[in-house]
Image (tube, rainbow, N blue to C red):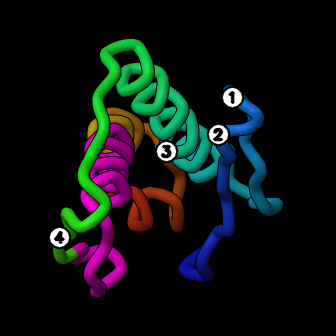
Amino acid sequence: MRDTLFSWSITRLPGTVFTGQVDSPEVLARDLIHEAGHHWFNAVLAATSVSFPENSVLYSPWRKEIRPAFGFLHACWAFSLIAIYSAQAVDMAPSPTHGFLCYY
């Protein structure tokens, strides 16, 4: 469960999520929420015509690297959504999923 679950989405296929196989429905839900959050954020940016300067960068504590503002804000949004989900799902999750969700 501590292994990295590779999930991703692409802007060319809005609403589509790609993910690896996982044995825990709670962990799968967490990654689906994370990726759906990216689509949601992209839709909001497009609807409001928000853009970011190419040279605008910030440090990402999740990746421990400098990232463009667009990527950094995406990470903040997606992480916030999975933190909210994890706080709600943790009490009903079985072990070891419970500990995994507590981490978030």
- Please state which amino acid type lies under the numbered disc 2: Thr
Q: Name which of mark 3 and mark 4 comes first in the sequence.
A: 3
Question: What residue do we see at 41% from left, 37% from top?
Answer: 89
Q: CA distance from mark 2 to mark 4?
A: 22 Å
- For residue 39, side relative to residue 6 (left or right): left
Most extreme residue toward the bottom is 64
- Please state which amino acid type lies under the numbered disc 4: Leu
Front label number (1 vs 3):
1
Q: CA distance from mark 3 to mark 4?
A: 20 Å
Circle 1 crowding by C-alpha within 10 Å: few under 14, some 14–19, many from 20: some
Find out whether the residues at labels 1 and 3 contact each other: C-beta distance under 8 Å.
Answer: no
Q: Which labelled disc corresponds to residue 5? A: none
Q: Name which of mark 4 and mark 1 comes first in the sequence.
A: 1
Name the element at disc 4. strand
Q: Position of residue 59 (x, y in %)?
A: 18, 76
Q: Label 3 belongs to which residue? A: 34
**Camera-side residue of 67 and 53:** 53
Circle 4 crowding by C-alpha within 10 Å: few under 14, some 14–19, many from 20: some
Q: Label 4 belongs to which residue? A: 58
Find out whether the residues at labels 2 and 4 contact each other: C-beta distance under 8 Å.
Answer: no
Q: Which labelled disc corresponds to residue 11? A: 2
Question: What residue do we see at 52% from left, 60% from top?
Answer: 97
- The residue segment tinted magenta is 60-83
- Please state which amino acid type lies under the numbered disc 3: His
Dominant secondary structure, magenta = helix
- For residue 34, side relative to residue 67 (left or right): right
Question: What residue do we see at 24% from left, 53% from top?
Answer: 53
